[in-house]
Amino acid sequence: SFEVQIASTGAVIRVAAEQSVVAALSEAGIEVQMSCEQGVCGTCLTRVLEGTPAHRDMFLTPREQARGDQFLPCCSRAESARLVLDL
Ligand code: FES
């Protein structure tokens, strides 16, 4: 598991192994717009301010994925222990 931190509030939310980031955020009362839930459409695109995402989407280009400053929380996860999200 890993944690996400909400930049605007400082809230820290644990994401369990079997859970998506979007699901963990939703449990904490933070709704991210979603559509495909499969990393295809880009609707859930979220900026990453700190930490390293583990990309699982097919939306970002390899170059965008390598930059690591945005990710698709419906399917992507974290390499680092924590991601700080621009939410
Ligand atoms: Fe489509 Fe996340 S909801 S990429």
Image (spheres, rainbow, N blue to C red):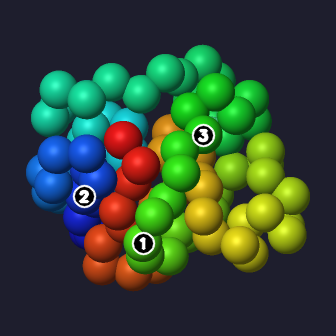
**Given the image, on which type of amino acid does mark 3 rest?**
Leu
Q: Position of residue 22 (x, y in %)?
A: 38, 37
Q: CA distance from mark 2 to mark 3?
A: 16 Å
Mark 3 vs ligand 1: CB below 8 Å? yes
Q: Is residue 67 left or right of residue 28?
A: right
Residue that carries the numbered disc 1 in the rendered image: 50
Q: Residue, x 60% and y 56% (percent of image)?
A: 70
Which quadrant of the frame does ligand 1 lie within? top right
Q: CA distance from mark 1 to mark 3?
A: 15 Å
Do the CB atoms of the residues marked 1 and 2 lie less than 8 Å apart?
A: yes
**Given the image, on which type of amino acid does mark 1 rest?**
Glu
Q: CA distance from mark 1 to mark 2?
A: 9 Å
Q: Position of residue 34 (x, y in %)?
A: 53, 23
**What element does badge 3 sit on?**
loop
Mark 1 vs ligand 1: CB below 8 Å? no
Q: Is residue 56 left or right of residue 82?
A: right
Q: Position of residue 21 (x, y in %)?
A: 37, 47
